[in-house]
Image (cartoon, grey):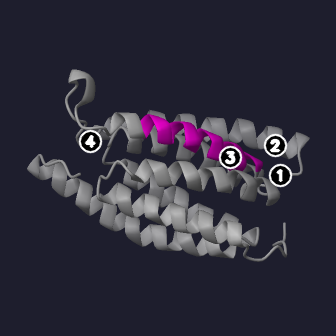
């Protein structure tokens, strides 16, 4: 598939600004990141559908639901529950998680290729299923969510560039740098047992 000729729109500028605010606030472990995530995902639902990235468009609806979940989970010890802190999963846990992501991507990519005019059906599916897992991990403050995001966002730069979502491709390039900062910041809280607000 070749790139389209839509160009950068005001809607994409706003979606990018909100998405960038989300990541910066998430690095700081600020609950307000989820408000930005919800708004950005609402805008990206339209943008991704228009770019024929149907799985990415559907993913935005999931992001909106997870933004509500994240907002609730990141509250400060409400309802007698302890405050959620950064945790790490054991390394052995990631192999089956990645295998499930790959199998789902193959299945949905095949369906998209056969029944739709989706652009890059397998890559679109892989980033979508991976992002669903990574978003849930972020909402649970799992340190390794940053590893998942790095892989997903690297592939996303290519997808968005090819679909002429140039500003969004640039955003995801910036994300790759911010992910490194996010990992270090979350790792520091894990090492020191701290919680940022």
Rounded to the nearest angstrom, the CA distance separating label 3 from label 1 is: 10 Å
Helix, strand or loop for disc 4: loop
Question: Is residue 33 at least partly visible in the picture?
Answer: yes
Residue drawn at (63%, 47%) of the image:
60
Q: Which label's residue is closer to the chain start, 3 or 1?
A: 1
Instruction: Please give the residue where the numbered disc 4 appears in the rendered image.
Output: 88
The segment highlighted magenta reads 54-70
Q: Position of residue 193 (x, y in %)?
A: 11, 46
Left or right: 166, with 54 as reference point: left
Q: CA distance from mark 3 to mark 4?
A: 26 Å
Mark 1 residue element:
loop
First of labels 1, 2 by sequence position = 2
Up-down: is 123 above or below 181?
above
Q: Is residue 68 magenta?
A: yes
Upstream in the sequence, badge 3 or badge 4?
4
Chief secondary structure of the magenta portion: helix
Is label 2 in contact with label 3 (beta carbons under 8 Å)?
yes
| Total numbered labels | 4
**CB under 8 Å between discs 1 and 2:** yes
The tag earlier along the polypeptide, 4 or 2, is 4
Image quadrant containing the N terminus: bottom right
Residue under label 2: 112
Distance from label 2 to label 3 (Cα)? 9 Å
Q: Residue furthest left?
A: 192
Q: Nearer the viewer, residue 104 or 167?
A: 167
Does 76 appear above or below 152?
above
The residue at which mark 3 appears reads as: 125
Q: Position of residue 9 (x, y in %)?
A: 73, 73
């Amino acid at each position: 598939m070749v790139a389209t000729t839509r160009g950068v729109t005001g809607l994409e500028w706003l979606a990018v600004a909100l998405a960038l605010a989300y990541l910066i606030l998430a690095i700081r472990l600020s609950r307000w990141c989820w408000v930005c995530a919800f708004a950005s995902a609402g805008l990206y639902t339209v943008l991704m559908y228009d770019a024929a990235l149907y799985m990415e468009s559907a993913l935005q609806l999931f992001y909106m639901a997870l933004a509500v979940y994240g907002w609730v989970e990141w509250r400060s010890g409400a309802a007698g529950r302890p405050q959620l802190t950064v945790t790490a999963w054991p390394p052995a846990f990631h192999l089956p998680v990645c295998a499930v992501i790959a199998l789902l991507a193959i299945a949905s990519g095949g369906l998209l290729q056969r029944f739709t005019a989706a652009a890059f059906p397998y890559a679109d599916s892989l980033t979508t299923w991976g992002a669903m897992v990574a978003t849930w991990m972020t909402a649970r403050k799992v340190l390794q969510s940053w590893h998942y995001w790095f892989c997903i966002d690297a592939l996303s730069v290519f997808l968005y560039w090819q679909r002429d979502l140039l500003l969004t491709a640039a955003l995801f390039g910036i994300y790759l740098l911010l992910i490194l900062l996010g990992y270090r910041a979350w790792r520091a809280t894990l090492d020191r047992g701290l919680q940022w607000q």
